[in-house]
Amino acid sequence: MNDDLMRRLRAADPAARGSALPASDDAMREAIMTTDTTTTDRSGARSRRARRGILAGVLATALVGGGAAYAGFRELWYTGGGGHEGVTCMARWGAPEAETSGGPWITGDALADCARYQELSGLPAIDDPVAFRIEGDPTLLYVAPRGEMPQGATVVDTDPRALALRELDSSMQDWVDGARATCLDEAGALAWASAELDRLGLDDWTVRTDERLEGQQEEACASVALAYDEAAAPEPGAGDPAAVEPTPESTAGSYVAVPRTLAVTPHSAVDIDSVDMDAWVFELRDTLRSQIADACVDLGTAERIAAEAVGEQHQWPPVVIEDPMADCTRVDLTGGGSIQISLRGPRA
């Protein structure tokens, strides 16, 4: 994938357009940390022939995809850690950058994602891995050997609904049949968000309407994203200034996440079909839509179709999660620096 295409993929991703709000993957990580656990099974509401409902118990069966189509670039691309937008993995704490791996979230399970990133980077598996944050930089998430955690580190456990929350994140950005697949108006976006929460069994979440940020460019479509409120400024001379530093509950200095809440913002998202991107990206979207989303195929068939459609173009590690209770494979295509394809469905 050339630099120009990567630039245009970023332009099509509202989370990478210079917004004052945190990036979507980092925000979803916070949502995972602040979501209570429920186990409500609900019927599918999205236009996919698939059962949704409970995904919590399926976490142990998550299978992150690979294959020959992704060889060649992987060892260089995934080395160096995930930064604030994902997870950073290392087989020994304090290892140099060349011995670390990482990238954006794959499944929402930091341990499973690091196992895959270590493999993709040609690095050793992490012995007795644990996910944690460290004092001084609470927005970074690390996975390293449990016995080597630095003093003051805070362990971060995987939420039982990590798979559902990760799927919510990708479906909000999806170009195939998700929130970005068509140019939604406010009413359409509100209906989509409510149906998506119902489909995923996130019945303790709510949806609200927000206004665009001051100075934010007016676009053709409504966006659906995690909700944020502006943080209250401390009164002059009151309290310790350190108390307003970013914390795991605040991934941006001036905004705080609203737990379990989605926000629909009218005229804040570009129409994907109007973005100047290489034709193969749209061809990929159309192939995934016609041959997977609309065709009701098993997971193995979907993997083959996706791999052949991508060819040698770069992508983040594909998300391939076995969902034995589904009738058909669900597919998401998202972009932001590079593409990522997510497949969730039954094995034949």
Image (cartoon, rainbow, N blue to C red):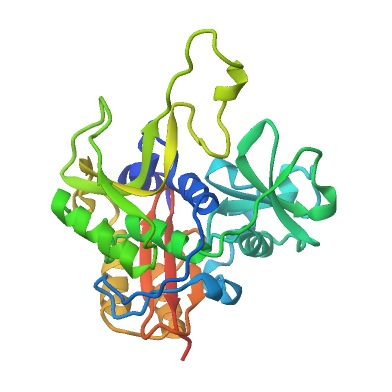
Q: Is residue 185 visible?
A: no
Q: Residue furthest top?
A: 237
In percent of width and height, residue 136 lies at: 68, 30
The number of numbered badges drawn on the structure is 0
Against 326, residue 227 (above or below) is above
Q: Quadrant of residue 170?
A: bottom left
Does residue 207 lie above or below 38 as drawn?
A: above
Identify which residue, 333 or 107, lies in the foreground. 107
At 26% from the left edge and 69% from the top edge, which residue is drawn?
Answer: 286
Q: Residue at x 65, y 51 (%)?
A: 156
What residue is rendered at 36% in x and 43% in y? 227
Quadrant of image for the N terminus: bottom left
- Residue 196 x/y as whole percent: 31, 63
Q: Nearer the viewer, residue 201 or 98?
A: 201
Residue 111 position, x and y percent, is 66, 61
Position of residue 276 in the picture relative to residue 19 (left or right): left
Q: Is residue 199 visible?
A: yes
As drawn, the residue found furthest toward the right would be: 147
Q: Name the residue nearer the viewer: 339 or 35.
A: 35
Q: Is residue 17 left or right of residue 179?
A: right
Residue at (48% x, 85% y) in the render: 324
- The correct choice, above or below, for 146 with respect to 292 in the image is above
Q: Position of residue 194 (x, y in %)?
A: 26, 59
